[in-house]
Image (cartoon, rainbow, N blue to C red):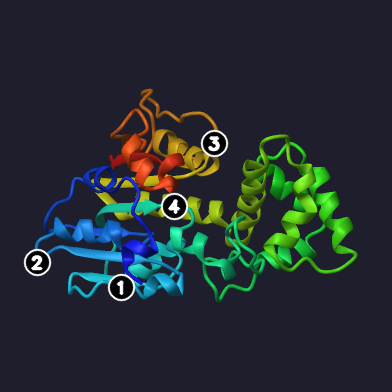
Amino acid sequence: MTSSEYHIPVLLNSSVEGLDIKPDGTYVDVTFGGGGHSKEILKRLSSKGRLFGFDQDEDAQNNSIGDERFSLIPENFGYIENYLALYGVNKVDGILADLGVSSHQFNQKDRGFSIRFEGDLDMRMDQSASLSAIQVVNEYDEEQLASIFRQYGELKNAWRLSQTIVLRRSEGKIKTTQQLIGLIEDLAPKKKMNQFLAQVFQAIRIEVNQELEVLKQFLLASSSLLGKGGRLSVISYHSLEDRLVKNFIKKGKFEGELEKDFYGNVIRPFKEVNRKVIIPNEEEIKQNSRARSAKLRIAEKL
């Protein structure tokens, strides 16, 4: 499988240009995937530049780039500071993140990410992780499930959904994606079946991979790792991710009001490079439907 078949990089030029790359600088692509963004960064680096990639998915690790300037770290990017320290790196010039699930992961039937295929309820990005979707669906109690669907899926009928799952699983374990869909499809609003199912799957996936907590860890670490003038370029795909990124760039925290010093100056680690969020044009969306919901925010370390 070629890296382009694995995953078509979204907002490729805009996200990499946003890093304002210094040829001799040190950069990090924390969501390596098929390596599309990484290859574009490498094109802009001199022989003295360095690029580190992160990806916890074994399939993505098979796409590693044979370039002496590049190192692939097979770990969760939430621990970016710890692993870069092992390479003697404590400051970098730019960090790029393309959040969410790769095209490859969605297209792998046995991974359980997609509503289109019959597959095991898995949804683990790190296939060595202990928690999978089958445990969430079959072992979480009503209150836990409702909380997940409400917070991570933003579903209005979260309680009814959780009650339905708990009642039906008493008759037998829910093991596959299509079993789950069959149990809950009657709860979907009229003409919004796919959106409803996507929200349900999103909620379970976020819980399995602790995606929002990992994102928070990463954003906090990025403010420590980036040197003054360093750039952060983040592509998100749903409102929960984008809200965290937006708030952190604007306020230096994930919720609450702006903090100011004694003189009334705003206390925050970044300034916005693009005040208006960057979205794909119609041509890119036509070529890659996954780009439809993408939002790019770029920030510079103060």
The residue that mark 1 highlights is: 64
Given the image, on which type of amino acid does mark 3 rest?
Glu
Nearest to N terminus: mark 4 or mark 3: 4
* Element type at mark 3: loop
Q: CA distance from mark 1 to mark 3?
A: 37 Å
Question: On the rendered structure, is 159 left or right of 69?
Answer: right
Q: Which residue is mark 4?
A: 99
* Residue 152 seen in render: no
Q: Given the image, on which type of amino acid does mark 2 rest?
A: Ser
Residue found at x 14% / y 52%: 22
Residue projecting furthest to the left: 47
Is label 2 in a helix, a strand or a loop? loop
Of circles 4 and 2, the one toward us is 4
Say whether residue 72 is visible.
yes
Residue 163: image tag: none
- Which badge, 1 or 3, is on the more N-terminal residue? 1
Structural crowding at the residue carrying mark 4, measured as other residues with C-alpha within 10 Å and reported as few (<14), some (14–19) or many (≥20): some
Q: Tell me if 264 is positioned left or right of 15 in this view.
A: right
Q: Tell me the quarter of the picture where residue 71 sits.
A: bottom left
Indicate the position of residue 236 as horizontal and vertical percent values: 44, 45
- The answer to whether residue 211 is above or below residue 251 is below
- Residue at the location (36% across, 76% down)? 62
Residue 145: percent from the left, percent from the top? 76, 53
Q: What residue is rendered at 63% in x and 44% in y? A: 194
Label 2 to label 1: alpha-carbon separation: 18 Å
Residue 173 higher or lower than 197, as above or below: below
Q: Residues within 10 Å of mark 2 (few under 14, many from 20)?
A: few
Task: Give the residue type at disc 4.
Answer: Leu
Q: Which residue is mark 3?
A: 255
Q: Can you identify the residue that label 2 sits on?
A: 47
